[in-house]
Image (spheres, grey):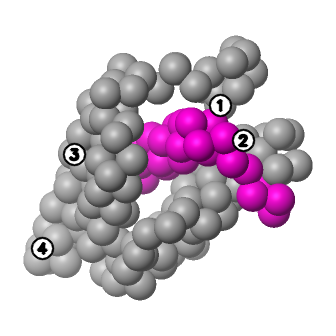
Amino acid sequence: MKIEEIISMLESDCQRFKEKSDLYLKTDDPNIKMDCIDIAITKINDITQIFKDISFFIEKRENRTIEKTKSLREKTKSLRASIRFYQSLDLEHSENEMKFLDNLLLRNEITHDYFNRDIHYEELIEIIINYSQGAIDLSNAIRNYCFKKGYFNDYLNECKQNVEDYPF
């Protein structure tokens, strides 16, 4: 799949997350609110995976690994390492984008710590209320960066050297 197509998927997921966040804020219907939360969780999972894949692609394509993420990346290809790497790129980040990224780590808690789901839902609601625009800012920043670097026609697997190189 071409990078431009993957970025389009990211943009679509970010837009859907933003739309459902806006709807959550506008409605008083508890069923609609829960539907919005369910969709937001799904979109956060999708955004997270695409973000990790694009981040890893850029890291491999530019043959650069920042020292802070090197050992972590080699061991786990984690979201935290992807965020650190992305933050090291030469581009301007909005405050909402950075807060949204910081809060993407909540995705792991929602996914794995289901015993505390209610607490994590409250944290998700804070993201919905305060940082949903950050999802749009993130997709725009990634699109602009990849466009400037000429990556649109590259394929995600072009930088793949070994099957183990990709986290999927």
Q: Residue at x 66, y 63 (%)?
A: 84
Question: Do tag 1 and tag 4 residues touch (Cβ < 8 Å)?
Answer: no
Q: CA distance from mark 3 to mark 1?
A: 22 Å
On the rendered structure, is 166 left or right of 149? right
What residue occupies the far top of the structure in this picture?
163
Q: Which residue is mark 1?
A: 167
Question: Do tag 3 and tag 4 residues touch (Cβ < 8 Å)?
Answer: no
Q: Is residue 10 visible?
A: no
Q: CA distance from mark 3 to mark 2?
A: 24 Å
State the extent of the magenta-drawn residues as a range. 43-69
Give the amino acid type for the residue marked by disc 4 in the picture: Thr
Give the amino acid type for the residue marked by disc 2 in the picture: Lys
Q: Answer whether residue 100 is magenta in the image.
A: no
Q: Residues within 10 Å of mark 3 (few under 14, many from 20)?
A: some
Q: Residue 62's spot in the image, x, y percent?
A: 59, 43
Comes first in the chain, label 1 or label 4:
4
SS type, badge 2: loop
Frontmost of labels 1 and 4 is 1
Q: Is residue 71 above or below residue 88?
A: above
Q: Residues within 10 Å of mark 2 (few under 14, many from 20)?
A: many
Numbered-mark total = 4
Q: Which residue is mark 4?
A: 27
Residue 77 tag number: 2
Comes first in the chain, label 4 or label 2:
4
Q: Residues within 10 Å of mark 1 (few under 14, many from 20)?
A: few
The image quadrant that residue 12 belongs to is top left
Question: Do tag 2 and tag 1 residues touch (Cβ < 8 Å)?
Answer: yes
SS type, badge 3: helix
Comes first in the chain, label 3 or label 2:
3
Q: Answer whether residue 47 is magenta in the image.
A: yes
Q: CA distance from mark 3 to mark 4?
A: 22 Å
